Image (spheres, rainbow, N blue to C red):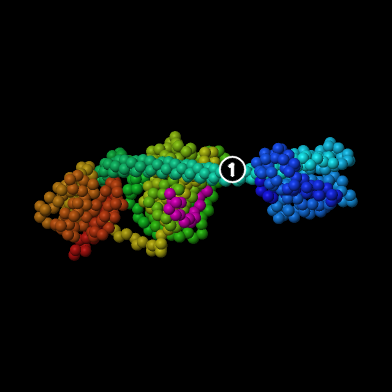
């Protein structure tokens, strides 16, 4: 027990009583009898030698106010009293009851012995004022020395144990608080890890879903491109042959009418093939600076006709957006398809469609968040947005709406949105769609801003076709195309040497007695394709004018021949007029250059 824990406050208005406490509680060497009693009563004292009893440290006060000041000073100084003997009657000042209460206000742990020679207050009265009797006892005067000594030892020890307990409880609370803080921090880290893992898992699923969709769309694109290529080859032969036959049919005859129907239906079928190639991103686009707002304004009359009369069609165009580079015909197709799609989605009121344009800066993250970022690069974009208040699109269907031939409409072909996606790919743009069942759908097409683009000057009126004779080398593995093209060339004054593939064409060129006026080569042929044949023929005739024809991948071929002089590209299927204009103009121009 520390020395500070043995400090006792004596509060009594009689100085003689102070002396009595001094004799009882402070060592008296001559009082061997008292020491013996103390040793018998208290184990710690019994272990000491007689006459070596440890003393209590006493402080005295004659009045309650004085005692309160002593207690306050001791508490402030860090040496509080553990026990106070308080007389109940101390005229003229405050009595022991009030003194004890005020002492407890300073130090709630203080043990108090109430000393009384009278019966002014009963135990019941004091219990009512003091509360629970865990820190106070009553001692009747005149008191017995042994009783005072016993109370002093017991209550001081009780105070000391209480302080130890409080210290241990405080330490335990600190340890519990520290452990709780550690556990809370660990729990927070765990929550963050779980949240991060969930975000990572969600991101992984989204990436996998987009990859799966991209692979599926790419696979469908390859399939669509291949089908369109084969159909274009067939349609080219049908279309050109029908045109040639119609020229020889009697005017106004049923034969001429039926041949004209064959031409018209062939052109319609060619349009479907064109949509397939557009979806596959394999159509040739004529890129030129464009004002997207102007393009929309030029299409407004047709757009209004496409929207139901009872629908509210609003157009909100941004002020002077930057120019973009694009194919005007293709971009009109994008706007038209999106508006038609919105119009067909309108069912219940309110029936509203809003078409608006604007500008946006998209970074890599924003592009990745779009439905189809395709080959778009981060930067500034001009966008066209078409929103409707239609039925909306379910999540499962939303993932498939850009697939060719997928449609939820009874009469739809499922090529409109797939063509839009192909056009966006060709223009290095991005396409986004947001939809909620029962609330409507919003499509937004982003086109990259063309840096330093200026509107092109008005084009000159094309000159009339001039045709002159000569021999043309024609190579195409599709017999119907080869026969129709040869007949067209002969009809316009050319001689024709025909080959079924590139290798045969090169062999014929090596045997030719005179230079050719030009060559018509199909890009896709067995053994040796059109580009390979072009290279070999140019070794034999370096300035040979060549028309390359292709059923698909015109953009890829155009990029390959961009730096080669004297080569023109023609997309299948072509009409008789388109073919002879491309071939004749090119060959005549080349002949004029040579002259």
Q: Nearer the viewer, residue 272 or 225?
A: 225
Q: Residue at x 70, y 46 (%)?
A: 51
Q: Which x, y percent locates residue 81?
A: 73, 49
Q: Residue at x 44, y 54 (%)?
A: 363
Residue 270 appears left or right of 412 = left
- Quadrant location, the C terminus: bottom left
Task: Provide the residue designation for mark 1.
Answer: 176
Residue 172 appears left or right of 56 = left
Q: Secondary structure at mark 1?
A: helix
Q: Residue at x 66, y 46 (%)?
A: 1
Question: Which residues are drawn in magenta?
Answer: 354-368
Residue 363 appears left or right of 180 = left
Q: Residue at x 16, y 55 (%)?
A: 537
Q: Which x, y percent locates residue 585?
A: 25, 57
Callout 1 crowding tier (Cα within 10 Å): few <14, some 14–19, many ≥20: few
Q: Which x, y percent locates residue 528?
A: 18, 48
Dominant secondary structure (helix, strand or loop) of the stretch shown in magenta:
strand
| Residue 241 is inside the magenta segment | no
């Amino acid at each position: 027990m520390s020395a500070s824990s043995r400090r006792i406050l004596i509060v009594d208005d009689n100085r003689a009583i102070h002396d009595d406490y001094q004799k009882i509680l402070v060592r008296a060497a001559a009082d061997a009898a008292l020491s013996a009693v103390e040793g018998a009563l208290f184990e710690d004292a019994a272990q000491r030698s007689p006459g070596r009893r440890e003393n209590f440290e006493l402080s005295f006060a004659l009045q309650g106010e004085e005692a309160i000041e002593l207690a306050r000073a001791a508490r402030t100084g860090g040496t509080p009293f553990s026990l106070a003997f308080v007389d109940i009657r101390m005229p003229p000042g405050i009595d022991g009851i009030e003194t004890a209460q005020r002492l407890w206000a300073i130090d709630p742990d203080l043990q108090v012995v109430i000393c009384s020679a009278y019966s002014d207050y009963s135990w019941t009265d004091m219990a009512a004022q003091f509360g629970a009797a865990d820190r106070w006892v009553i001692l009747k005067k005149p008191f017995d020395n042994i009783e005072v000594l016993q109370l002093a030892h017991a209550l001081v020890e009780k105070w000391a144990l209480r302080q130890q307990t409080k210290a241990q409880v405080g330490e335990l609370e600190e340890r519990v608080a520290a452990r709780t803080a550690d556990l809370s921090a660990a729990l927070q880290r765990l929550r963050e890890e779980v949240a991060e893992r969930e975000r990572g898992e969600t991101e992984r699923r989204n990436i996998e879903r987009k990859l799966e969709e991209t692979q599926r769309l790419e696979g469908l694109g390859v399939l669509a491109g291949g089908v369109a290529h084969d159909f274009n080859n067939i349609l080219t032969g049908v279309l050109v042959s029908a045109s040639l036959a119609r020229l020889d049919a009697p005017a106004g005859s049923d034969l001429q009418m039926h041949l004209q129907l064959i031409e018209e239906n062939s052109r319609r079928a060619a349009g479907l093939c064109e949509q397939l190639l557009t979806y596959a991103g394999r159509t040739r686009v004529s890129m030129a600076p464009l004002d997207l707002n102007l393009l929309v304004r030029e299409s407004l009359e047709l757009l209004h006709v496409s929207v139901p009369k009872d629908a509210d069609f609003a157009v909100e165009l941004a002020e002077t957006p930057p120019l973009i580079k694009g194919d005007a015909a293709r971009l009109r197709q994008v706007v038209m398809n999106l508006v038609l799609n919105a119009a067909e989605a309108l069912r219940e009121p309110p029936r509203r469609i809003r078409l608006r344009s604007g500008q946006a800066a998209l970074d890599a993250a924003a592009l990745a968040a779009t439905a189809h970022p395709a080959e778009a690069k981060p930067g500034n974009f001009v966008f066209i947005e078409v929103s409707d208040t239609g039925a909306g699109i379910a999540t499962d269907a939303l993932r498939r709406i850009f697939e060719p031939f997928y449609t939820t409409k009874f009469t739809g072909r499922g090529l409109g949105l797939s063509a839009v996606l192909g056009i966006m790919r060709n223009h290095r743009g991005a396409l986004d769609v947001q939809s909620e069942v029962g609330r409507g759908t919003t499509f937004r097409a982003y086109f990259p801003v063309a840096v330093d683009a200026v509107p092109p000057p008005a084009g000159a009126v094309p000159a009339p076709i001039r045709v002159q004779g000569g021999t043309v080398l024609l190579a195409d593995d599709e017999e119907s195309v080869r026969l129709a093209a040869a007949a067209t060339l002969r009809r316009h004054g050319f001689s024709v040497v025909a080959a079924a593939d590139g290798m045969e064409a090169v062999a014929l060129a090596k045997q030719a007695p005179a230079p050719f006026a030009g060559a018509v080569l199909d890009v896709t042929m067995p053994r040796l394709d059109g580009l390979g044949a072009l290279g070999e023929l140019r070794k034999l005739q370096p300035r040979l004018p060549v028309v390359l024809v292709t059923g698909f991948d015109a953009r890829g071929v155009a990029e390959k021949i961009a730096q080669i002089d004297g080569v023109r590209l023609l997309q299948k299927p072509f009409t008789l007029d388109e073919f002879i204009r491309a071939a004749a103009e090119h060959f005549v121009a080349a002949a004029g250059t040579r002259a």
